[in-house]
Amino acid sequence: MAARLPSALSAPGTSTSAGPAPAAERAGYLRIVDRVGDFWIVGVAALLVIVGGILTPGQELFTKGAWNSISGFSVEYLLLAIGQTFVILTGGIDLSDGAILGFSGMVSGATMQAMLNSHASGLLTTVVGFAVALGLGALIGFLNGFVIVKLRLPPFIVTLGVLTAVGAAPSLINGGTEVDTLPPQIGAIGTGSLGGWIYTTFLIALVATVVFGLILHRTRFGLRTFAIGSNGLSARRAGINVDRHLMCVYAISGFLAGLAGMMVMANFNVANPLSGANDELDAIAAVVIGGASLFGGRGNMLGTFIGTMIISLLVTLLPLLNINGSWTEVVTGFIIVAAVALDQVRLRLAER
Amino acid sequence: MAGLARPSGASAGAGDDLGTGPGGGGEGAPVIAVQGVSKHFGSVQALRGVDLELYPGEIVGLVGDNGAGKSTLVNIISGGLQPNSGQISVDGERVAFSSALEARRLGIETVYQDLALAPDLSVWANIFLGRETTVRGILGRLGWLDRRSMAIAAEKDLARTRIRIGSVNAAAGRLSGGQRQAIAVGRAVAWGSKVILMDEPTAALGVEQQERVGELVASVAADGVPVLLVSHNLPQVHKICDRVVVLFQGAVVANLRPRECSMDEIVSWITGAAVSGGRL
């Protein structure tokens, strides 16, 4: 064998030359598509803000009221989408997080009502209320993961079943009516704000985004979450306890749904049995718009944040433009398909 | 039936006296000793009483036709499969691996045929996956990664493979086949303190990269770590291996020294011609 062929000679016959990375060999326009893929959603968001702001009568989009509407709407979707990001990165899906939101909120509300009726202090009641919602959410999420892992069932099926069962449960609590006997602390969380610009609930959602974003992108747990979605077999061979990891991921999703339940309750100062219904689809949409692949392994928390804010923006923007609010869902639907299509195009490019 | 002829270790082949290989191969006590290992899948007998010893610094080729039992044997040594009978010793101590993880903890690293990479993870993350370095202190306890030190260490590991990889921060899936191979080999070299098992490491490579992997294998062995190389690439096996073990229908039929035999001879053992032809 001739020692040391120049790489230019070894390249043609062998598709696997160790020359420069394929990205560097690619034609310019393909590279642009590739690059744009990382940032297009930021562009969409910026475009929506600028064009929407110009088109709204009196530039109403740039008012405090519009911002409070956008940020207030985003809270529950943001919390659900954070958990959904972890789940989708593993290649799974959690259809049950909206149902968990509603159920844990109702159970927490009913618990707090019972405590107040037996003259417990407002503070203690609030603490217990949070513990119940977060604990119940995490427990149901863990059970999702447990069934998925132990019975080796598709996440879609398991969480669809939980969505159906848990989604109906709130109507069985408190006669299916709102719980409005809540401690004053709950209402205070809903109305509290920093200068009227950043409401407490939005602040909590922001903190959760940052904390879980750091967990995802800077810790061992996050790295392994990506690894499992990218190549589950490789992750197992690397010694990662994939089953335990998946149960944790679904528990996180449930935990955040429980927190979302408390935030919704605080916003309206009631526990409503209808809270969270259909929220899971918006959460999944936000994650996908944010650039996550439904096949797992790819996505990021900043994208999820932007995706959620785009959906929230549309919900506020369209009525300001005198467009029927239902168009939000139409537009969202198109953006989802566009996002997934772009993802597929990029994937094919990467494989060339 | 030819396959039932049970040559034990060296008796069948040319290389009976071990410990003479140039390049320091094959001295001292065996690092790994496989003794009488059998494995069946249902009624299919994949391995029949296989003996195999790997000495410090040796490069041992494991060859045989498809279905001869090469992958099964590698999987047993790497802990992925458990034998039905027989035993494995590492440094003279008997071991029983219930998983690949246990084998890895003892420094037995495998380069899998599919490379076992996570394509979406960076190069350094692939090298450290499952053995991540965390920062010191309380943040480290919580799993906060020391990305910098892992990236630097990964660069060093890959420098040994001498296959150029633009950046250790690039996603593994975006690299060429040769570069991906380099990651898998570099990872095994970085962690394999006892023995490195390679399952068709050059199958997906161009000529130049095959050469480089060959050089890498030689440099690993020169450091005293034996390498078990499963390959269909007989010219390469003949060129770089100190010893070639031939599996035929689940049994070791020959233990040859490439320097003392021709490639045709190896082929005749692989096909079974030598077994039935009475060349013993």
Image (tube, coloured by chain):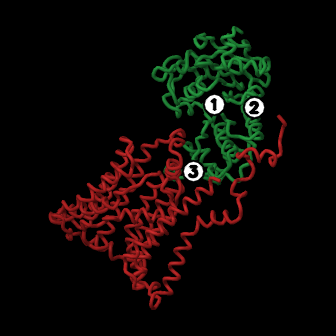
Chain colours: A red, B green
Which disc, if any, is residue B218?
Answer: 2
Is residue B262 positioned above or below A165 on the image?
A: above
Label 2: which secondary element: helix
The reply to whether dot 3 and dot 2 touch (C-beta < 8 Å) is no
Residue A253 shows up from this direction: yes
CA gap between label 1 and label 3 equals 31 Å
The reply to whether dot 1 and dot 2 touch (C-beta < 8 Å) is no
Label 3: which secondary element: loop
Residue B175 point in image, percent of width and height:
67, 50
Identify the amino acid type marked 3.
Answer: Val
Whether residue A152 sits left or right of residue B195 in the image: it is: left
- Please give the residue where the numbered disc 1 appears in the rendered image: B197
- Please give the residue where the numbered disc 3 appears in the rendered image: B135
Answer with mark 1 or mark 3, whichever residue precedes in sequence: 3
Residue B235 point in image, percent of width and height:
76, 28
Tag count? 3
CA gap between label 3 and label 2 equals 34 Å
Identify the amino acid type marked 1.
Answer: Leu
Residue B280 shows up from this direction: no
- Of all chains, the one bearing label 3 is B
Residue A231 point in image, percent of width and height:
53, 46
Answer with mark 3 or mark 2, whichever residue precedes in sequence: 3
Identify the amino acid type marked 2.
Answer: Ala
CA gap between label 1 and label 2 equals 13 Å
Q: Is B184 or A71 nearer to us in this picture? A: B184
The reply to whether dot 1 and dot 3 touch (C-beta < 8 Å) is no
Quarter residue A138 falls in: bottom left
